Image (cartoon, helix red, strand yellow):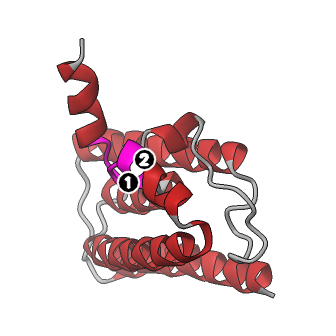
């Protein structure tokens, strides 16, 4: 049930973003700049790669909390706790920037806030289910989305 609902919501997010791009063109809410186009597609591609890596490492990511039987902590999960959401956020923002769509950019930011809230809620559920094991993972991987503290730790110990 959760998987099918998740799939419907994911498709709805992408369709809404694409609709915003199209509406932006028709109502003159878009702009074109070659630099932003290149930057946007680069951000989009990076986001999709991160999202792919998150699913490669944790194929059960879209399952219900009851079906998840381990804490993913290897690969990209050793850098950030929510690479799947990070990948989607970057992909949405990148697409909006690539097309120069102000409306799509607003929607992408709203999606980013939504995914941030989902990540916070999921962390509470993971702490309830896995307790100390997830708390230790949170200490080892201190950042939800951008591995700033992890990078600082690595630089400090070199």
Count the marks: how many? 2
Residue picked out by circle 1: 94
Identify whether 73 is placed above or below 15.
above
Residue picked out by circle 2: 80
Q: State yes or no: residue 141 in magenta.
A: yes
Q: In the image, residue 23 lies at what x, y percent?
A: 40, 82
Range of magenta residues? 138-148
The answer to whether any part of residue 82 appears in the image is: yes
Q: Image check: 46 left or right of 15?
A: left
Dot 2: what SS?
A: loop
Q: In the image, residue 81 lies at what x, y percent?
A: 46, 53
Q: In the image, residue 140 lies at what x, y percent?
A: 40, 43
Work out whether mark 2 precedes mark 1 in sequence or the reverse, and give the earlier one.
2
- Viewer-side label of 2, 1: 2
Give the farthest residue toward the front.
132
Identify whether 111 is placed above or below 94.
below
Query: What residue sits 60% from the left and 66% below the top?
Result: 130
Q: In which quarter of the image is the N terminus?
A: bottom right
Query: What residue sits 24% from the left and 11% below the top?
Result: 158
Mark 2 Cα within 10 Å, few/some/many (few <14, many 20+)?
A: many
The main secondary structure of the magenta stretch is: loop
Q: State yes or no: residue 155 in magenta.
A: no
User: Residue 114's image quarter?
Assistant: bottom left
Q: Image check: 113 left or right of 48?
A: left
Kindly indicate whether the residue at mark 1 contacts the one at mark 2 (C-beta within 8 angstroms).
Answer: no
Query: What residue sits 50% from the left and 60% below the top?
Result: 132
User: Residue 108's image quarter?
Assistant: bottom left
Q: Image check: 33 left or right of 14?
A: left
The answer to whether any part of residue 141 appears in the image is: no
CA gap, disc 2 and disc 1? 20 Å
Dot 1: what SS?
A: helix
């Amino acid at each position: 049930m959760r998987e099918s609902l998740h799939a419907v919501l994911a498709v709805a997010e992408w369709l809404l973003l694409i609709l915003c791009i199209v509406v932006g063109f028709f109502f003159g809410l878009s702009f074109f700049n070659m630099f932003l186009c290149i930057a946007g597609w680069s951000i989009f591609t990076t986001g999709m790669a991160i999202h792919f890596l998150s699913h490669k490492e944790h194929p059960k990511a879209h399952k219900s909390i009851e079906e998840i039987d381990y804490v993913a902590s290897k690969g990209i999960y050793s850098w950030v706790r929510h690479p799947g959401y990070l990948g989607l956020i970057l992909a949405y923002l990148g697409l909006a920037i690539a097309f120069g769509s102000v409306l799509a950019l607003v929607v992408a930011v709203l999606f980013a806030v939504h995914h941030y809230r989902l990540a916070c809620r999921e962390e509470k559920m993971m702490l309830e289910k896995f307790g100390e094991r997830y708390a230790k993972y949170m200490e080892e991987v201190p950042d939800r989305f951008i591995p700033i503290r992890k990078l600082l730790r690595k630089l400090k110990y070199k």
